[in-house]
Image: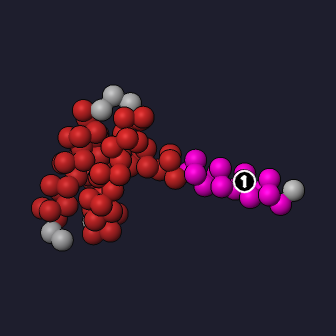
Amino acid sequence: MSLTECRCMVENIDRKMRQLNNEIEILVQIADYMPDFHHVMTNASRQKMDAFYMEYDGFFRFAKTLETLAISISENKAKAQNRQSN
């Protein structure tokens, strides 16, 4: 995948995220943009990802929402496992 293709995907995610008002709206839309995010994440270098985050606020917001969601799921899974072992 070329850097141009990655940038197009980033721009599409950024554009959509800028239209949304809160994290709930992002969560409703998140699944539609996961394949593009995954492609960018796996094909762009860490430095390029950081540059995309700096340049595209909506793309950064999307990534931070995913991160928050992943942390929450992980923490809740750990809590559930602790309850089961007690």
The image shows residue 55, relative to residue 82, as above or below, that is above
Percent across and percent down for residue 35 are: 30, 61
- The overriding secondary structure of the stretch rendered in magenta is helix
Q: Residue at x 41, y 35 (%)?
A: 23
Percent across and percent down for residue 17 are: 28, 39
Q: Nearer the viewer, residue 31 or 11?
A: 31
Amino acid at circle 1: Ala
Q: Does the segment drawn in magenta span residue 74?
A: yes
Q: Is residue 80 visible?
A: yes
Q: Where is residue 61, by image quadrant?
A: top left
Q: Residue at x 24, y 32 (%)?
A: 19
Q: Which residues are magenta?
A: 71-85
Quick one: SS at disc 1? helix
The image quadrant where one finds the C terminus is bottom right
For disc 1, the neighbor class at 10 Å (few under 14, some 14 to 19, many from 20) is few
Task: Name the image colouring.
Answer: secondary structure
The image quadrant where one finds the N terminus is bottom left
Percent across and percent down for residue 45 are: 30, 67
Q: Residue at x 19, y 61 (%)?
A: 6
Q: Residue at x 58, y 47 (%)?
A: 72
Q: Where is residue 55, by image quadrant?
A: top left
Please indicate whether residue 82 sits to the left or right of residue 11 in the image: right
Q: Does the segment drawn in magenta span residue 72?
A: yes
Residue under label 1: 80
The image shows residue 43, relative to residue 65, as above or below, that is below
